[in-house]
Amino acid sequence: MKQFTLILVDGDARYRGKFLDYLMRRDHFPMLCRGCGDPEKAREMAGKEPAPLVLFGEEIWCGLTPEEKGRFRAECVGVGLLTEEHPAGTDPGEALSEGENCGESGEWPELFLLYRYQAMPQLMNRILGWKESLESEVDPVPGGRTRCAAFLAPAGCGLLPTLALGAGRLLAGESRVLLLDFSDFSVLARTPAEDVTTGRMSESLSGAERRSLSDLLYLQASGNTWHLAELLGRMGELEWLMPVVSPEDVWNLPGEEMAKILSDCAAREEYDWILVLPGSGRDPLPLLKECQRIFLLEEASPGSRRGTEHFLSWLRQKKAEPVKERCRRIVVPAFPNLRDLVPEDDNLRFSPLGEWIAGEMTAWFA
C-alpha cells in the first residue's frame, strides 16, 4: 500500500498546529503529517517525503506566482486549498478550477477545495477521500514478483473458503503459495494443518502452541517484529496463516491494516501467489487495491447475481474503477455431495469440486 504524506502550508501557526495534532492523534490515520508556513520549505518537504499531498491556506496559495504553482502541481501527487469562505453552490471537499476560487485565470485543470472552518472529523474524512481518489494513479497495483488474488462472495457463498483453499492446494503443486484468511468465523480454523516450525499437526497443539493471525495482529499492534515463517502452517505444499483464534481480534480491524499485512507479506517476494479472504463486515477496498486478481463468487440465483452487481456498483461509487476492472465474476455450480467439499482430502483433484477448480483455474491465474 502506497504511503502518502500530507503537508499543510498555512500562515496561521495556531490553526496549523491544532489541525496536525488532531490528525496525528488518530490511531489509524494512514498518512504522514507535516506542516509549515513557508512555500519554499514545503517544496523541500515534498521532495523528501513519499507521495506528497500539499494543502495550502488560501492566502499563501493566492500569493504564489503561476510558475511556483506550476512547480507544486508538477512535483506533488495532489494540491488542495483551504478556503476562508464556502463558495455558494459547492460542497466542502469539492474539486473546482482555481479561477472559481481565487479570481484568477482558471488555467489550472482542477484544485481540491476544503472549507477550513469545518469540524475536524469532517476535514479528516474529506482528506481521506482525496487520498483514496488519487491512490490508483500513484500505485494501482504492486509490481513485485509476488502476485495477490482475493476471493469474495458479495451475496454469500458457502463454498467460498473451501474453494479458495482448494485452489490454493492445486496451485501450490506448481508454485509457492500462501493463503491469508481475515474472516472472523472461518471454517478453515478447524482444518488440520502441519505447523511449519515444529512439524506437528495443528490438532495436536495446545491453544498456547497454535500460531495464527491473532499472534501476528498482537505483534504488529505492540510494535514488535514478526517473522512470517514462524507463524505458518502447511497443508501439503500450501502454506497458510491460521485464522484468528477469537473473532473479536478482527472485528475492529481497519481495511488499511489488512492491506498492510498483505503488502508486507508480498514485499518479501517469497511466494508466487498470495491468496486472501477479506472476510465480511469491514471495508475491503484497501486490501483489494493490493491485488492483481479479484474473484467474485456467486451462486446461480437472481439474489446472488444482484449481490455481485451491487458490489460492483459500490466500487463505481467509490471511484475505484481500476479495482473494478480487475474483478472476475465466477458462477459456482452446485455440489450436492458434501464429501466432495473436503479441501484437506488428498484426493481433492479427483472429486467433482477438484475437477471443476482444476478446469477453471488456468484461466483464473493466467
Image (tube, rainbow, N blue to C red):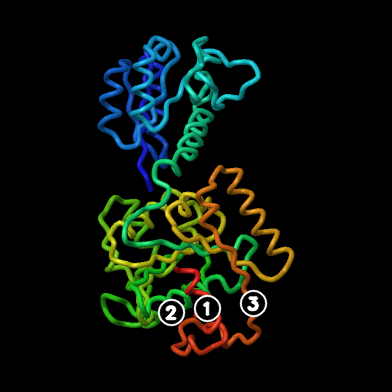
Mark 2 surroundings: few (<14), some (14-19) or many (≥20) residues within 10 A: many
Q: Is residue 109 above or below residue 227?
A: above
Which mark sits nearer the N-terminus, 3 or 1? 3
Residue 41, numbered label = none
Q: How many marks?
A: 3
Q: Position of residue 58 (x, y in %)?
A: 45, 14
Gap between marks 3 and 1, in whole Å? 11 Å
Q: Earlier in the sequence, mark 2 or mark 1?
A: 2
Q: Residue placed at 64% from the left, 59% from the top? A: 308
Q: Which residue is mark 2?
A: 170
Q: Are marks 3 and 1 in contact (CB under 8 Å)?
A: no
Label 3 – label 2 distance at C-alpha:
19 Å
Query: Secondary structure beneath disc 2?
Result: helix
In front of the other: 147 or 240:
147
Marks 2,1: beta carbons within 8 A: yes
Q: Which residue is mark 1?
A: 357
Residue 124: percent from the left, percent from the top?
48, 31
**Residue that appears at 61% across and 72% down:** 158
Mark 2 belongs to which amino acid?
Leu
Q: State the mark number for residue 333.
A: 3
Q: Residue 65 at what x, y percent from top left?
A: 37, 12
**Mark 1: few/some/many CA within 10 Å (<14, 14-19, 20+):** many
Q: Amino acid at mark 3?
A: Pro
